[in-house]
Amino acid sequence: MEHKIQDSFLEARLAETVQLTRFDECHEVFRSRMFAKVLDDEEEPFLGGAIAKIDPPDHTVRRKVLNRLTKRDGHRWFRDQGLTPTIPRVLADEFASPDADGVVRTNLVVLSRRMNAELAAAIIGFRAWTQEPGPTS
């Protein structure tokens, strides 16, 4: 029964779609402010907020920030200013706290979120996250 419900739901959604076959049609739709990207409930936790899945003005703001990575030599900048200082520092924090048996265990989801947050901070120039803490006065 569940498959029939899903199939009929899909059929109803497909009946509402329009197939674009020419470049000029696609170009017109993608440039239109009336066009919006819609995520299913299953996609939202994984793709929500991704540059390809958001609309202006959020898309435009994020695209300007990310352009730094896609312009000439942007990959070198990201490697030198983002990856090279961030990854060793985050891993060193993890290795500094082994369990009683000497083995380091960590939640990879939390670790990857922290690394992504720090890399994002490096991209936007928020140095407080991307540098070692200095001496306190």
Image: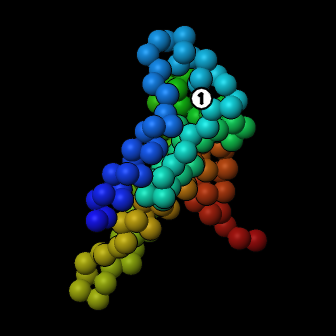
- Kindly identify which residue carries mark 1: 67
Query: Which SS class for mark 1?
Result: helix
Give x and y (percent) for residue 32: 67, 25
Is residue 104 shown left or right of residue 22? Answer: left
Q: Residue at x 30, y 57 (%)?
A: 4
Front residue of 110 and 80: 110
- Relative vertical location of residue 80 with respect to residue 109 in this rendering, above or below: above
Is residue 94 shown left or right of residue 136? Answer: left
User: Which residue type carries mark 1?
Assistant: Asn
- Relative vertical location of residue 77 with respect to residue 82 in this rendering, above or below: above
Give x and y (percent) for residue 69: 53, 31
Colouring rule applied to residues: rainbow
Front residue of 77 and 52: 52
Is residue 2 shown left or right of residue 79? Answer: left
Give x and y (percent) for residue 111: 42, 65
Q: Residue at x 25, y 81 (%)?
A: 102
Is residue 117 shown left or right of residue 135? Answer: left
Q: Residue at x 29, y 89 (%)?
A: 100
How many C-alpha atoms fall within 10 Å of the one at disc 1: few (<14), some, or many (≥20)?
few
